[in-house]
């Protein structure tokens, strides 16, 4: 068998200590990977990197988003609601793969000291959902139209160790961690009239600590840390951390954001490299001769899952999974979703098919023109909404002449004479008569992401495979 350093790396470092690699001696593996000693520790370190990637990313995201004195734009201090008044634009870099279909109504909370009470107004039948993510990116509750309806409702979000009595009419949602990200989404068509209607609803939301519930409350000003990098994308900031800094932060975070009980077997292995929940990181147990390579290999393994994870489906060039929001012990999937779509919902609420290549298996390029055709009656089956969003190669929005980042039924798509519907995916306008169906692309490489919110579970359905995603074909 002809192994190279490259195919060993992308073939799965997680198997280094396993029987499937027994055809090579540890010395040979170490030579191929450039590691003199400590091969098993290296494998454990990359496993630990993947395990902790969601928690570290959530913390870095929290720091950036809350590093303001008062709510402004896409940011607000801890415990204060961010009321996004319009869709993000191409300058937005806080979260990968943002959407341009809903107005985020969100907040970061610390429920370690006391619960926080969220009051949701009567949404008047409008589609919305308000997922609550713990520090590990698990969606532990998701009130909204699908689950709890659109009437007014009030919840107390409590921390992992909290015990007490709540006021009448307040329902408890217990978070497994002190970090909580309320990542609400309210559907909006993007017209001035609909923006105004959603803004009115957003202004009726209330978020207060339990001790202030039912009393006048003025949120305190946030503390601004001038040393924080507020320009570099969060994912890039995480990826450039060295292993020692990364694991030091991970161990610190696990004190207030405990791993799940099901994680115990995995965590027991990490003690060998100085990672123990509730304790500071012991850097002396991490070998110096390979430590620099851990973040790079760890992230490569994460991104490789997009192509090889058994729970990733590949349909007409679109990859998707129904394993978002709740991950159990699938640490690779959890890390992958963190890397390409932090804040993803449970599959009952949303599925995110993603495509990097056309029907011929070639990378998308703005130098080409593409068409995505939906046969008559075969537009994406979703009870909430559907859309196709354009991203650059790093999963961020792209500047374009009509400021359109996603396309959906709200564009009043024009059908062909046979009832089919074409989406024109290209850099330049396909002509005024076709612009309603145009999704502008950048000049370079790009990625497409489809969103099906509240995907239909009745046939035709993406969930059971009775509805197929059309391929994107290059126009000759």
Image (tube, rainbow, N blue to C red):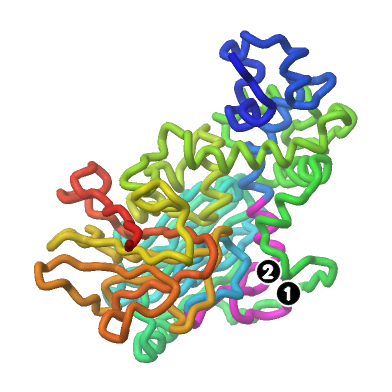
In this view, the residue in front, 432 or 275, is 432
Residue to which mark 2 is pinned: 66
Q: Is residue 226 magenta-colored?
A: no
- Numbered disc total: 2
Instruction: Residue 6: give x, y in percent of width and height.
Output: 66, 31
The residue segment tinted magenta is 57-86
Q: Which corner quadrant of the image does residue 219 belong to?
A: bottom right
Query: CA gap, disc 2 to disc 1?
Result: 8 Å
In this view, the residue in front, 435 or 214, is 435
For the C terminus, the image quarter is: bottom left
Would you say residue 258 is visible in this rendering?
Answer: no
Left or right: 293 as drawn, with respect to 117: right
Find the residue positioned furthest to the front: 476
Left or right: 116 as drawn, with respect to 421: right
Q: Which corner quadrant of the image does residue 218 belong to?
A: bottom right
C-beta proximity under 8 Å, tags 2 and 1: yes
The crowding category of the residue bearing disc 2, from other C-alpha atoms within 10 Å (few below 14, some 14 to 19, many at least 20), is many
Residue to which mark 1 is pinned: 222
């Amino acid at each position: 068998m002809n192994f190279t350093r490259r195919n060993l790396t992308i073939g799965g470092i997680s198997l280094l200590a396993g029987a499937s690699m027994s055809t090579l001696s540890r010395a040979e593996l170490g030579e191929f990977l450039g590691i003199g000693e400590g091969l098993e520790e290296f494998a454990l370190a990359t496993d630990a990197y993947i395990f902790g990637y969601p928690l570290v990313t959530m913390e870095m995201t929290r720091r950036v988003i809350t590093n303001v004195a008062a709510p402004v734009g896409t940011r607000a201090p801890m415990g204060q609601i961010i009321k996004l008044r319009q869709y993000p634009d191409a300058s937005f870099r806080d979260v990968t793969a943002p959407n341009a279909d809903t107005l985020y109504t969100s907040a970061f909370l610390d429920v370690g000291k006391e619960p926080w009470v969220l009051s949701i107004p009567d949404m008047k039948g409008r589609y919305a959902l308000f997922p609550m993510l713990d520090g590990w990116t698990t969606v532990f509750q998701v009130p909204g139209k699908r689950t709890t309806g659109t009437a007014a409702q009030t919840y107390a979000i409590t921390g992992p160790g909290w015990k007490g009595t709540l006021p009448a009419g307040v329902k408890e949602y217990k978070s497994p961690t002190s970090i909580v990200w309320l990542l609400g989404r309210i559907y909006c068509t993007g017209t001035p009239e609909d923006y105004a209607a959603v803004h009115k609803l957003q202004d009726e939301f209330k978020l207060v600590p339990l001790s202030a519930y039912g009393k006048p409350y003025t949120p305190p000003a946030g503390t601004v840390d001038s040393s924080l990098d507020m320009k570099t994308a969060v994912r890039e900031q995480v990826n450039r951390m060295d292993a020692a800094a990364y694991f030091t932060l991970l161990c610190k975070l696990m004190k207030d954001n405990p791993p799940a009980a099901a994680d115990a077997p995995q965590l027991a292995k990490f003690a060998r490299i100085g990672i123990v929940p509730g304790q500071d990181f012991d850097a002396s147990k991490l070998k110096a001769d390979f430590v620099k390579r851990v973040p790079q290999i760890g992230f490569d393994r994460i991104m490789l899952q997009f192509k090889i994870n058994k729970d990733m489906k590949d349909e007409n060039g679109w990859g998707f999974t129904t394993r978002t929001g709740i991950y159990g012990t699938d640490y690779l999937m959890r890390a992958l979703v963190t890397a390409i779509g932090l804040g993803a919902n449970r599959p009952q609420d949303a599925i995110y098919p993603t495509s990097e290549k056309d029907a011929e298996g070639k990378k998308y390029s703005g130098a080409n023109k593409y068409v995505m055709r939906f046969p008559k009656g075969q537009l994406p089956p979703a009870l909430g909404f559907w859309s196709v969003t354009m991203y650059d190669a790093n999963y961020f929005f792209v500047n374009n002449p009509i400021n359109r980042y996603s396309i959906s039924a709200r564009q009043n798509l024009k059908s062909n004479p046979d009832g089919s519907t074409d989406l024109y995916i290209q850099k330049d306008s396909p002509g005024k008569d076709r612009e309603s169906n145009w999704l502008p692309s950048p000049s370079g490489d790009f990625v497409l992401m489809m969103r099906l919110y509240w995907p239909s579970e009745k046939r035709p359905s993406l969930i059971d495979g009775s509805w197929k995603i059309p391929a994107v074909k290059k126009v000759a």
